[in-house]
Image (cartoon, grey):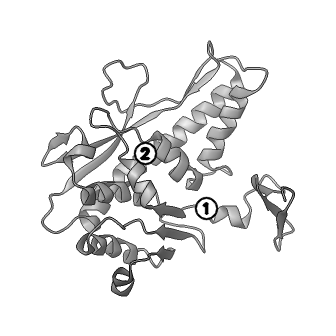
Amino acid sequence: SSDLEIKITFDDGSECTLNRDGLYHSSGSLSPIKLLNKGSAFINHSFVSRFHNARNSEEIDLWNVFHKDILPFWLPPYSAEYLSDTYDNIIALCSAEKKPRKNDPGLVTAINAFNNSLKTLIELVNLRASGIYNGFLKEEDDKDLIIKLMFIEDNNSENKYHEQFFLRYDGAKSLIKPPKIGLQVKEDGKDIDKPQTYFNEARQTGIALAVRFACLSDYPEPGSFLALDDMLISLDMSNRECVLRYLFSITNKYKIYLFTHDRSFFELI
């Protein structure tokens, strides 16, 4: 039935309702359930595949990965709204029957807040991802990598990387133009133009996980968790051991739910 729902009441009197349309809260503040999203993550093999889902001739653009898999779990400092919600609210505002003007104060403020928060997240990834990969996720004989997220401007016809990005509103077309998030990888100081064709699947998986793990909070809410659903299904056991090294290093901060149908991997863990 379409009208079925579950209501949850917390000790402070706040409520949330779960139905087929999603999770709704009785107040504007974050409920205990929604706070668990802060720093938590759901990662499966599809996430890893989407991370490098670009043709050989294309530059990697990670915006859809961030929008779907990372921003719903990123709560900017001093904010009561996850970054994915901020983006969705901007889209709703620009899709309203009465379209906002390009210089509408509310729209300008919301877009600037989104851009600044995403910039903070990207800077955090760039600070951490290489260390996570080189310290935990690569095999002993592999070379160290420098992993960096870059931003590609929509109006740049040459499609080169820029350390700038914009979520922009095209007032003439009443459309939001999302940012493009590129991936730059260096090996021995050499730029790897197409990581999706240069590296084997094990190293591609390590790069994807390094970026995702770099987004995790150092101070997650009590009860925050990682749900990992056969995300290593295509890796051999030695590469899986590299990922396990990292997971075991954060068990003091996160509950980890790791699902696998591989009995030998289960016994290794």
- Tell me if residue 181 comes above or below residue 146 in the rendering: above
Instruction: Give the residue displayed 26% in from the left and 60% down from the top.
Output: 202
Residue 180 screen position, x and y as percent: 44, 33
Instruction: Name the quarter where the C terminus is drawn.
Output: bottom left
Secondary structure category for the residue under label 1: loop
Residue at the top extreme, as displayed = 172
Residue situated in front as seen by the camera: 214 or 231: 231
Q: Which mark is residue 122?
A: 2
Say whether disc 1 or disc 2 marks the residue closer to the N-terminus: 1
Residue 234, position as x, y percentages in the image: 32, 64
Q: Tell me the residue that label 1 is attached to.
A: 37
- Give the amino acid type for the residue marked by disc 1 in the picture: Asn
Quadrant assignment, res 155: top left
Give the residue drawn at x 14%, y 58%.
Answer: 143
Task: Tell me residue 186's x, y (percent).
Answer: 20, 45
Report the Cα–Cα distance between label 1 and label 2: 19 Å
The residue at 60%/74% (across/down) is 223
Q: Residue furthest front?
A: 1
